[in-house]
Image (spheres, coloured by chain):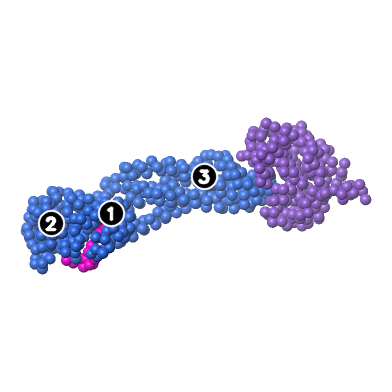
Chain colours: A blue, B purple
């Protein structure tokens, strides 16, 4: 029997008999679509911000260490030096790998920092400023003074630490750290600038200086580094990049290394992001869960008004199934109209919220979330899942909303043609 | 044996009932709307059913057309007892064997005259070209030419009833049941509708059974069945 197109046609025409009701119902669904897409977009914006600030401030998105560096972080477990890796060449090689945007070498040490009466424990981080700036925003968070120049015994530190030590750019700083040769390295440095990242550990405990100067302080050999941090083009490709063989120095037979993506060393951040993805499903379920009852109610009303017509077509020999389907078709067409309208209103709103993020600085100066320092803005991120999940939610809504009315319609007795 | 009895022995029954009852469960007492009716309508008949209001005309037509189920007794259409059929099969019988014309609300407002008239053919899976050709020919025959694309709201009462008659006969059913088809029409229009039905009865051999209150309509029938209190009081052929 090829009467399906008839029922689609009847469904379409019936929708426009009460066009106001149809438009209001479609508008409700379209608005639900808009809400879902925008909420998901903002969620993704928050997650992206979280990952971005969580990985780009200091850690990088992929980290490479010597095989035995972790978990003790022994200062002797280095890449480079007599291990056979020429770090400069290695870094250049890493930057040719797919998805790798930049690579930066680091040297770490623990020690004491003092000025006058005050002494605090600190983490010394030796960086190559030019490379570091391409991998993290660490140096960009300089709020006062200037960056240290290599070879001149200059350093910068977090603002919290500077306050504790009661120092400002220009102050002299004494640094003490256990050196590689077993001696105690100590030297007089000058503070050239102060960092503010919003991350308490960084602002309170980090001392950043050129890698050359730190090696000298630690009596470390030239060419040795503890860590290479990578920036990749999209945080979510980091695990794949970390698994890739391309990161091995001098091929598979080279010295052993250990590679970790941020999803490993910031597992709680990845966990949080995954949780947030699950929230999308809940958002869509709640928004459209409410809409189902509204749409079902509208369909019940409109089919009840037409029950005599359903009885008539049943009397003429239509199968109960066919009249039920026409209600489903009606609801699906309504869903598609709502989806089209929803897309039309959602696109500019998303564009606006992406280009002109909501500024929350009136309410907060920024906050930390899952250990990431967040900037006080709400930016909607463009994603495919937002619209796709919401569109599926909308169409499922129109399908589910039609089920009960369709069932009711299929039960209308054919003898009711003349009933009033 | 009377002449009538001979005639109906040789004829093919379009519909036949055996001791048919319809009892509506009602407070305080159940309503016995049809009480033990034995009736046979033969192929090609043009029969009218009359009776006072509440005598059971609509109920009997609904039983004959498989719109309601008997409380007791049998309804036979083309060798099938339809009283006990499942809903789906019953719908199939209505589609293939029965044409209906109701007193009012006959047409789907969202379909054109043509789409309303071709409805049974569409359900039967007939192709567009066949459907259109059949409807055009029929519309020409009953004076509806040129109205094919009008929606029911833009047709007069008489035109709407003609479209309903066209739909009832279009798929050549065994039987057309019409419940007071002229009740909402003025007498001239009603008479014209009856002309149409009579001509279709003659040209296509379509079997008609219609109910009416109107003596002038009764006169036109070649058989008149009188119903009183749910039972057949008289049954005359002319
Ligand atoms: N669905 C129903 N439920 C209960 N009783 C009903 C129902 N339909 C009809 N009846 C009763 O059955 C009896 C016969 O009704 P029916 O409508 O068949 O009469 P009718 O001859 O068609 O009358 P009218 O000339 O007024 O159309 C009436 O007493 C009526 O009240
Ligand atoms: Mg009646």
Which label lies toward us, 2 or 1?
A: 1
User: Bounds of the magenta span?
Assistant: A59-76
Q: Residues within 10 Å of mark 2 (few under 14, many from 20)?
A: many
Write the residue at 24% across / 63% down: A254
Distance, label 2 to label 3, CA atoms, is 68 Å
Residue that label 2 marks: A212
Q: Is residue A367 visible?
A: no
Residue that label 1 marks: A97
Toward the viewer: A377 or A81?
A81
> Residue A420's image quarter?
top right
Q: Is mark 3 within 8 Å of ligand 1?
A: no
Q: Residues within 10 Å of mark 1 (few under 14, many from 20)?
A: some
Magenta stretch mostly in which secondary structure?
Answer: loop
Is residue A73 left or right of B7 when viewed as pictured?
left
Q: Quick one: SS at disc 3?
A: helix
Write the residue at 20% across / 53% down: A132
Write the residue at 55% across / 52% down: A403
Residue that label 3 marks: A334
Mark found first going from the N terminus, 1 or 3? 1
> In x, y percent, where is residue B68?
72, 52
Q: Chain of mark 2?
A: A
Distance, label 1 to label 3, CA atoms, is 49 Å
Distance, label 2 to label 1, CA atoms, is 26 Å
Which label lies toward us, 1 or 3?
A: 1
Rendered image: mark on residue A52: none
Q: Are marks 1 and 3 on the same chain?
A: yes
> In x, y percent, where is residue A47?
32, 53
């Amino acid at each position: 029997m090829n009467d399906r197109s008839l029922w689609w046609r009847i469904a379409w025409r019936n929708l426009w008999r009460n066009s106001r009701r149809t438009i209001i119902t479609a508008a409700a669904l379209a608005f639900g679509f808009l809400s879902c897409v925008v909420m998901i977009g903002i969620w993704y914006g928050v997650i992206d911000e979280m990952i971005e600030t969580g990985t780009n401030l200091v850690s990088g998105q992929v980290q490479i260490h010597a095989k035995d560096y972790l978990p003790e972080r022994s200062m002797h477990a280095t890449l480079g030096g007599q291990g056979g890796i020429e770090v400069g060449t290695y870094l250049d090689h890493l930057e040719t790998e797919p998805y790798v945007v930049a690579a930066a070498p680091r040297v770490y040490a623990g020690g004491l920092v003092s000025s006058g009466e005050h002494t605090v424990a600190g983490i010394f981080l030796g960086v190559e400023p030019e490379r570091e700036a391409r991998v993290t925003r660490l140096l960009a968070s300089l709020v006062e003074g200037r960056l240290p120049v290599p070879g001149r015994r200059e350093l910068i530190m977090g603002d919290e630490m500077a306050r504790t030590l009661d120092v400002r750019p220009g102050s002299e700083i004494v640094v003490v750290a256990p050196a590689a040769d077993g001696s105690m390295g100590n030297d007089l440095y000058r503070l050239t600038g102060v960092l503010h990242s919003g991350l308490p550990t960084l602002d309170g405990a980090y001392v950043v200086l050129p890698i050359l100067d730190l090696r000298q302080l630690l009596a470390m050999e030239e060419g040795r580094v503890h860590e290479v941090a990578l920036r990749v083009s999209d945080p979510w490709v980091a695990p794949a990049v970390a698994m890739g063989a391309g990161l091995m120095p001098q091929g598979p037979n080279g010295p052993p290394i250990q590679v970790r993506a941020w999803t490993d060393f910031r597992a709680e951040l990845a966990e949080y992001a995954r949780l947030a993805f699950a929230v999308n499903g809940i958002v869509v379920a709640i928004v459209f869960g409410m809409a189902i009852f509204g749409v079902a109610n509208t369909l019940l009303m409109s089919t009840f008004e037409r029950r005599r017509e359903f009885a008539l077509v049943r009397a003429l020999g239509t199968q109960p199934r066919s009249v039920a389907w026409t209600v489903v078709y009606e609801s699906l067409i309504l869903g598609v109209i709502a989806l089209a309208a929803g897309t039309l209103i959602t696109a500019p709103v998303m564009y606006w919220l992406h280009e002109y993020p909501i500024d929350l600085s009136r309410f907060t100066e920024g906050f930390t979330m899952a250990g990431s320092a967040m900037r006080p803005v709400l930016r909607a991120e463009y994603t495919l899942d937002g619209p796709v999940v919401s569109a599926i939610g909308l169409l499922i809504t129109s399908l589910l909303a039609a089920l009960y009315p369709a069932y009711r319609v299929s039960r209308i007795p054919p003898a009711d043609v003349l009933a009033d | 044996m009377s002449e009538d009895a001979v005639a109906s022995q040789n004829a093919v029954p379009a519909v036949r009932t055996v001791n048919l009852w319809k009892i509506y469960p009602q407070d305080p007492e159940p309503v016995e709307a049809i009480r033990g009716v034995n009736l046979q309508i033969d192929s090609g008949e043009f029969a009218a059913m009359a009776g006072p209001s509440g005598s059971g005309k609509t109920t009997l037509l609904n039983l004959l057309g498989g719109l309601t189920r008997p409380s007791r007794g049998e309804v036979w259409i083309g060798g099938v007892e339809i009283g006990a059929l499942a809903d789906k099969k019953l719908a199939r019988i209505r589609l293939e064997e029965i044409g209906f014309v109701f007193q009012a609300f006959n047409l789907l407002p969202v379909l054109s005259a043509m789409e309303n008239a071709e409805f049974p053919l569409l359900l039967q899976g007939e192709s567009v070209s066949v459907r259109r050709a059949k409807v055009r020919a029929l519309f020409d025959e009953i004076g509806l030419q040129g109205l094919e694309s009008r929606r029911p709201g833009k047709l007069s009462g008489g035109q709407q009833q003609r479209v309903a008659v066209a739909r009832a006969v279009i798929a050549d059913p065994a039987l057309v049941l019409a419940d007071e088809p002229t009740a909402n029409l003025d007498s001239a229009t009603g008479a014209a509708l009856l002309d149409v039905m009579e001509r279709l009865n003659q040209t296509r051999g379509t079997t008609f059974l219609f109910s009416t209150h109107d003596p002038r309509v009764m006169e036109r029938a070649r058989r008149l069945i009188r119903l009183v209190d749910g039972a057949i009081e008289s049954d005359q052929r002319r």
